[in-house]
Image: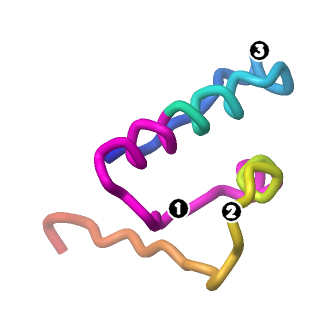
């Protein structure tokens, strides 16, 4: 499982995200994964669509403070 993967702004738009996401997908497939769930930022959505991911639902995150 991978979480909170990002590319530093100084290195974006160079294909690094595509290479990394393809490698992660290949590794998951080798371990038997046939489907996946991906939550994307607006910036990441175009990349993931270009890699073949399909948007099924929009997700709204919630923040719950620990001591309230």
Magenta region includes residue 36: yes
* Residues at marks 1 and 3, CA–CA distance in whole angstroms: 24 Å
Query: Of the residues under marks 2 and 1, which one precedes in the sequence?
Result: 1
For the residue pair 65 and 18, the one nearer the viewer reads as 18
Query: Of the residues under marks 2 and 3, which one precedes in the sequence?
Result: 3
Q: Residues within 10 Å of mark 2 (few under 14, many from 20)?
A: some
Residue drawn at the location 17% of the way across and 64% of the way down = 66
**Can you identify the residue that label 2 sits on?**
53
Q: Is residue 35 left or right of residue 58?
A: left
Q: Is residue 9 left or right of residue 14?
A: left
Q: Pick out the residue farthest to the bottom.
A: 57
Magenta region includes residue 58: no
**Can you identify the residue that label 3 sits on?**
10
Report helix, strand or loop for mark 2. loop
**Can you identify the residue that label 1 sits on?**
38
Residue drawn at the location 52% of the way across and 61% of the way down = 38
Mark 2–mark 1 CB contact (< 8 Å): yes
Quarter assignment of residue 9: top right
In the image, which residues are magenta? 24-46
1 or 3: mark nearer the eye: 1
For the residue pair 5 and 68, the one nearer the viewer reads as 5
Residue 6 x/y as whole percent:
58, 33
Q: Residues within 10 Å of mark 1 (few under 14, many from 20)?
A: few
């Amino acid at each position: 499982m991978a979480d909170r993967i990002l590319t530093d702004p100084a290195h974006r738009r160079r294909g690094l995200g595509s290479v990394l996401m393809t490698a992660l997908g290949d590794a998951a497939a080798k371990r038997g994964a046939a489907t996946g769930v991906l939550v994307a930022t607006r910036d990441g959505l175009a990349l993931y669509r270009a890699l073949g991911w399909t948007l099924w639902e929009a997700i709204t995150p919630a923040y719950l403070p620990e001591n309230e």
